[in-house]
């Protein structure tokens, strides 16, 4: 019974609400462009090695004769300093970028949501301690903090993902805390408490379902910036190392090929730009569709 | 001759549901020196009529379908924006309902009043009684002196000190006085007052009405007084027009309209004003205002 | 007002203590055995012990923290394990370069984005606004290191219009150090040619760093302008005959700008974070490049110091922004 009240309160749950949200999403052509690009990126991330024109190049089977070939019918994006097909590398890079970025966001969401739920629901000194700690993390730029943590943990992709997530969660904690403080006083929560439900049950059965849509919106908006952060760390030389086909690493390596072999830099760079833009457009569309305050 | 003469004014507004005609042929004349009430319920078009005279209805979404507004010999709907700006402040001024939001919270009252004074003086140098070639600095100093004078005139105590306050340091009634002072600093002929006392306490209301009235007596100001309150109309106006759903249903001298209303809607509006004879708790209307008008 | 300023400054103290603890934990506790890292993978146990003793790493963590904090008060940020040089001296050398770059980018960002946002807000949902809004969304998606590379490729390598990297050519001596900002120092010394050279070296990195903040500030300025235009006081000012130009550039701009200003603290933090990328692309000898090299060498004292300095700059910027906000918003300033 109480579960039904909760679903009603959220307003966007249920088939009708979703249909309306999708209708609003479709209204903006830019959101649709974002959706198509995101779908394409996900496809590449899953099937990348299968659709890459030269999968053997990824394994390092290359010919020295193919070094620095400019873009052509055979190599659409040209080849790099060891003769690898850049298109194949870019396609394979989607997997590394998207998987790490999503890993960062999922971990950051888990940490941030738990901390935000606890701070918002219990209030008092728990809120005070958790939020002061959150503010403290926010005084450091996420990239610098992630670099410092990654340096302490040692170089590896997993450590990089953990480091970025540890720098990323405060945004989610603040968002969830704000929502929870508003929901705590709602009738259905008060009613559940009056029925004798415990804190855990109220938080996870009644409050959490009503916070999901702002969390999902922030997650989708943040994936783009997480892709950017992963590529940034790759460019700096922390986390992903060559020869892993990662866009930031490819760009970093290409610097010594400029200005003559410009295609070794331009195509990986464009890949990052398009991927980030895709998630920004998609996330912005999702925000307008799901967040009543963003509507005009 | 009438100072303001509106003939057959028709205005349409575009909204999500399409275009709706909100003023359906308004005819209204206000003679020189009159205090003319325009009274009606929310959405009757009384505010849009006032804003139309100053041409402050944004177009789009607004669109004039026809009619004519003659003010002091100017055809207002045909005037360019530049010509309109020359009239605003010096010939026509306005005051609005909420004294809190109509003053800019980020600037001192002195800054806002001096800018208003300089704006009118740029078109009518006599206001500062300085030659047009005077230095900027000198103009500002004289404008400030004039602003202080005006503040004193509207009843702000110690105006030379108080003028440098920020709006939030004034009470609502004092802010409305400041807005009146700003509106009248350019010696306009017509003041359009759009619900100027609605947001104020009853005791302050009476003071502000008396203040507006004093300008009519002293300076020959003409006032278009927009309100939903017939009690206020009875207190201050000598002419009244009753509006409903974009039309004027009845107009004439206050004494005549309020003592022997010809239109059912006017009677209904009057019946909704509580009187001394009403019993406590008796809120039933003798006539339903909506049904009566149909 | 003065007591309010003092109150705000007092509030910073616990934040600084927390910050020092945080960076200390990241730099000294997280790596597990910093001495082993510092001594290198092939070091013997004795060599490791020697490094630990030299840097005080054989002490209990609490003692290490105490020593570190007391050192801070004497301006001692420890020494680099790689170069054995005092970190404070290195920072004094590199920090001005970063601050000059950040300041130039911030000036550029504000100068470009405020008018751009004003135009977008005034033409909301019409052609100029659509163009600007599409541009800002793209700019926010552009990776800075890629933008930097493209600008280098076009303007330095292909067109040879601007220098590729660095603060000055190797053949030119920096101006006598007063502020550490080459632009200001060369003006103070009257070295106009050096001023010109340092400005052209500053151009590409500053543009690179400013692009994303330009996009973000433009979006906020657009929203603030649209909101300010809806206000009653704008209509009232028009009804009194004030010119549109005066209303826009004096009344609307101040209200919109003060809403925008609150966000500038965030951008400074964001720019400080992006120094690691921009300084690497342009070989700009600032703390970002210094920190990157230290991190790659697992040289913990410089990492701790740079993180601490960036946190302190961020906190100070936000304090200044808050106090400025009080000046722009008389209601707040009265407290």
Image (spheres, coloured by chain):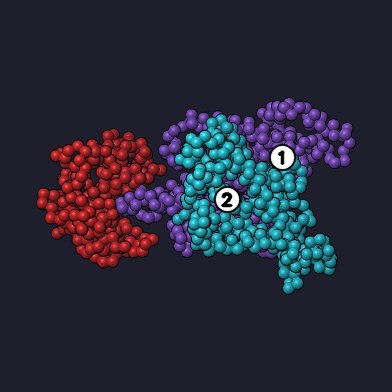
Chain colours: A cyan, B red, C purple
**Residue drawn at 34 percent across, 64 percent down:** B19
**Residue drawn at 73 percent across, 37 percent down:** C30
* Residue sitting nearer the eye, A296 or B291: B291
Using the image, determine if residue C255 lies above or below residue A25.
above
Measuring from the top left, give residue C206's x and y in whole percent.
62, 52
The quadrant in which the C terminus of chain A is found is: bottom left
Measuring from the top left, give residue A240's x and y in whole percent.
75, 51
* Residue sitting nearer the eye, A79 or B255: B255
- Identify the subunit bearing mark 1: C
Using the image, determine if residue B28 lies above or below residue C178.
below
Is residue B179 found left or right of C144 in the rendered image? left
Q: Which mark is residue C303?
A: 1
Please name the residue that numbered disc 2 is placed on.
A216
Dot 2: few (<14), some (14–19), or many (≥20) neighbours within 10 Å?
some
Is residue A147 found left or right of C235 in the rendered image? right
Q: CA distance from mark 1 to mark 2?
A: 34 Å
């Amino acid at each position: 019974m109480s579960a039904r009240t909760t679903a009603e309160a959220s307003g966007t749950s249920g088939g009708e609400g979703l249909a309306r949200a999708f209708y609003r999403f479709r209204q903006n052509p830019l959101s649709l462009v974002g959706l198509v690009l995101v779908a394409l990126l996900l496809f590449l991330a899953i099937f990348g090695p299968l659709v890459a024109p030269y999968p053997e190049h990824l394994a390092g089977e290359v010919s020295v004769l193919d070094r620095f070939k400019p873009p052509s019918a055979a190599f659409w994006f040209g080849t790099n300093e060891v003769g690898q097909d850049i298109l194949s590398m870019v396609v394979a890079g989607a997997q590394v970028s998207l998987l790490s970025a999503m890993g960062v966001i999922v971990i950051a969401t888990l940490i941030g949501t738990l901390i935000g739920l606890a701070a918002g629901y219990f209030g008092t000194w728990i809120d005070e301690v958790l939020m002061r700690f959150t503010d403290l993390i926010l005084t450091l730029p996420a990239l610098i903090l992630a670099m410092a943590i990654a340096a302490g943990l040692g170089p590896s992709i997993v450590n990089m993902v953990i480091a970025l997530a540890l720098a990323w969660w405060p945004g989610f904690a603040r968002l969830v805390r704000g929502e929870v403080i508003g929901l705590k006083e709602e009738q259905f929560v008060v009613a559940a408490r009056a029925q004798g439900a415990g804190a855990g049950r109220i938080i996870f059965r009644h409050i959490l379902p009503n916070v999901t849509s702002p969390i999902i919106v922030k997650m989708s908006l943040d994936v783009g910036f997480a892709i950017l952060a992963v590529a940034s760390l790759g460019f700096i030389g922390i986390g992903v190392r060559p020869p892993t086909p990662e866009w930031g690493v490819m760009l970093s390596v290409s610097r010594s090929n400029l200005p003559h072999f410009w295609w070794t830099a331009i195509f990986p760079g464009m890949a990052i730009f398009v991927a980030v833009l895709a998630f920004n457009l998609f996330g912005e569309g999702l925000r307008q569709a799901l967040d009543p305050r963003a509507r005009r | 001759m009438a100072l303001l003469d509106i003939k057959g004014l028709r205005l349409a507004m575009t909204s999500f549901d399409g275009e709706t005609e909100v003023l359906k042929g308004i005819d209204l004349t206000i003679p020189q020196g009159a205090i003319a009430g325009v009274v009606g319920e929310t959405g009757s078009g009384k505010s849009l009529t006032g804003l139309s005279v100053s041409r402050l209805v944004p177009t789009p979404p607004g669109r004039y379908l026809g009619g004519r507004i003659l003010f002091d010999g100017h055809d207002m709907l045909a005037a360019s924006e530049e010509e309109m700006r020359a009239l605003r402040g010096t010939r026509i001024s306005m005051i609005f309902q909420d004294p809190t939001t109509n003053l800019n919270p980020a600037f001192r009252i002195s800054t806002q009043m001096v800018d208003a004074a300089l704006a009118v003086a740029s078109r009518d140098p006599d206001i500062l009684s300085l030659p047009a070639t005077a230095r900027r600095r000198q103009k500002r100093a004289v404008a400030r002196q004039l602003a202080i004078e005006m503040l004193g005139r509207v009843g702000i105590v110690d105006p030379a000190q108080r003028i440098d306050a920020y709006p939030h340091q004034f009470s609502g009634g004092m802010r409305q006085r400041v807005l009146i002072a700003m509106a009248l600093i350019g010696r306009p002929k017509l003041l359009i007052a759009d619900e100027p006392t609605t947001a104020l306490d009853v005791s302050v209301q009476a003071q502000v009405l008396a203040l507006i009235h004093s300008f009519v007596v002293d300076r020959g100001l003409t006032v278009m007084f927009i309100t939903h309150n017939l009690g206020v109309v009875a207190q201050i106006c000598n002419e009244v027009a009753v509006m409903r759903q974009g039309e004027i249903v009845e107009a004439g001298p206050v004494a005549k309209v309020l003592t022997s209303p010809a239109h059912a809607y006017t009677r209904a509006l009057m019946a909704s004003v509580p009187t001394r004879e009403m019993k406590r708790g008796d809120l039933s209307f003798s006539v339903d205002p909506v049904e009566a008008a149909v | 007002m003065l007591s309010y300023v003092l109150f705000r400054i007092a509030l910073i103290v616990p934040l600084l203590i927390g910050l020092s603890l945080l960076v200390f934990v990241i730099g000294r506790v997280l790596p597990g055995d910093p001495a082993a890292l510092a001594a290198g993978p092939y070091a013997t146990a004795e060599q490791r012990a020697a490094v630990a003793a030299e840097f005080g790493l054989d002490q209990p963590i609490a003692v290490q923290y105490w020593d570190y904090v007391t050192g801070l008060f004497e301006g001692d940020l420890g020494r680099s394990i790689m170069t054995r040089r005092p970190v404070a001296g290195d920072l004094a050398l590199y920090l001005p370069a970063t601050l000059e770059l950040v300041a130039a980018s911030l000036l550029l960002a504000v100068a470009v984005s405020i008018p751009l946002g004003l135009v977008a807000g005034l033409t909301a949902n019409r052609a100029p606004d659509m163009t600007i809004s599409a541009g800002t969304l793209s700019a926010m998606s552009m990776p800075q290191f890629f933008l930097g590379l493209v600008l280098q490729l076009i303007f330095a390598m292909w067109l040879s219009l601007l220098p590729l990297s660095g603060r000055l050519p190797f053949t030119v001596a920096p101006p006598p150090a007063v502020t550490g900002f080459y632009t200001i120092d060369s003006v103070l010394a009257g070295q106009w040619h050096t001023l010109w050279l340092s400005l052209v070296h500053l151009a590409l990195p500053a543009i690179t760093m400013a692009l994303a903040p330009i996009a973000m500030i433009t979006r906020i300025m657009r929203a603030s302008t649209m909101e300010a235009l809806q206000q009653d006081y704008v209509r009232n000012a028009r009804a009194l005959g004030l010119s549109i130009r005066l209303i826009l550039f004096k009344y609307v701009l101040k209200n919109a700008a003060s809403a925008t200003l609150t966000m500038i603290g965030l951008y400074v933090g964001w720019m400080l974070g992006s120094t690691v990328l921009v300084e690497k692309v342009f070989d700009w000898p600032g703390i970002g490049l210094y920190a990157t090299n230290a991190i790659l060498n697992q040289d913990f004292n410089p990492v701790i110091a740079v993180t601490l300095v960036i946190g302190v700059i961020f906190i100070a910027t936000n304090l200044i922004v808050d106090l400025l906000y009080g000046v722009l918003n008389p209601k707040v300033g009265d407290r």
